[in-house]
Amino acid sequence: MPETFLSRAGWRDATRTDLAGDASGRRYTRLLRGTESAVLMESPDAAIGPFLTVSAHFDDLGLSVPRIIASSEPQGLILMEDLGDDTFARVIAADPAAETTLGEAVIQCVATWQAAKVPAWAAAYDAEAMTAALEPAWTHAAQPAGPTEECGRLFRTLLEEHGGDEVVLVHRDFQAVNLVWMPGRQDARRVGLLDFQDALAGHPAYDLASYLQDARRDVSPETEAWMLDRFCTVTGRDRDAFGGAYALQSLQRNVRILGLFARLAERGRTGYLAHVPRVRGYVERSLRHPAAAPLADPLRACLAGQVAA
């Protein structure tokens, strides 16, 4: 525990409780000091500069991100505001009827940052980068003799074909466990944002795919369709064109996740395999869209028998 860092911030004597980490290796600790609380993030393997940069951008847009209390880039440490435990995943699990209210807040939040200019620091997550990002799937999840090169070529072609010209900031980990429900705030600020350090410049559909095809929870096709329709209405996008792009963005994301889960399992972190059947279901859902039809047979051949729990 970084005692000197906490001492300088005035939190060394706080009561400490470990919080769940994530696949990245970052560690989180809740600190309690009287009636106050904060969260310490320790990032021993990844620079914290991107977290601070994205946090400042979202804060400038008036969105809800944890206030930074103290940070040390050389040590990989951030002490930040504690947004609480009411993640969207937890709130919806306790009250499924809340899905609609929280969904509206999600749409407001995403629409807010997508309406802003993409920051210059955001690297491109375009068709080329997204195709390259599929490497874990081909290396760790695909059949040895599967047509991985064909799948890669098709992914790039289809992502370009359905990509359009619009580029927005993409959160990239926009899942229900990384969103905190804050009903005491207004409009888009009701969504507390976490784990946004991997943000890039990409397609407007990507973060909706993250939220609506979440590896950790079931989202019905009806909820998915309603939110896509609502998002297109609010943002003035063409539903048919957006639907094709969404199917391919979702497909790329979930195929990549299968590869990441398989790689983690090879390293002994097998807990993520419990989510594989759900992710495979999302892959099949995307493959049923006409925009993804050219990928259906070769991708199924690649992923046949892919490891599951």
Image: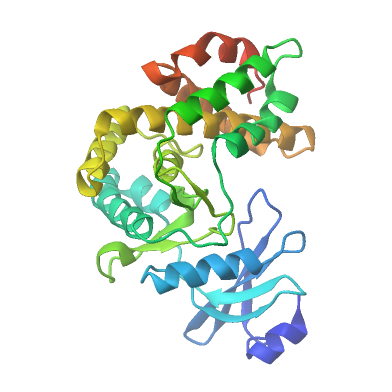
The x, y position of residue 225, in whole percent, is 27, 32
Mark yes or no: residue 102 visible.
yes
- The residue drawn where x is 52% and y is 15% is 295
- The residue drawn where x is 54% and y is 62% is 120
The front one of 204 and 272 is 204
Mark yes or no: residue 305 visible.
no
The x, y position of residue 104, in whole percent, is 25, 51
Relative to 308, does residue 254 appear above or below in the rendering? below
User: What colouring does the structure picture have?
Assistant: rainbow
- The residue drawn where x is 66% and y is 34% is 132
Relative to 34, does residue 177 appear above or below in the rendering? above
The front one of 125 and 40 is 125
Q: Residue furthest front?
A: 165
The x, y position of residue 32, in whole percent, is 56, 80
Q: Which quarter of the image is occupied by the C terminus?
A: top right
The front one of 191 and 114 is 114
The front one of 59 and 81 is 59
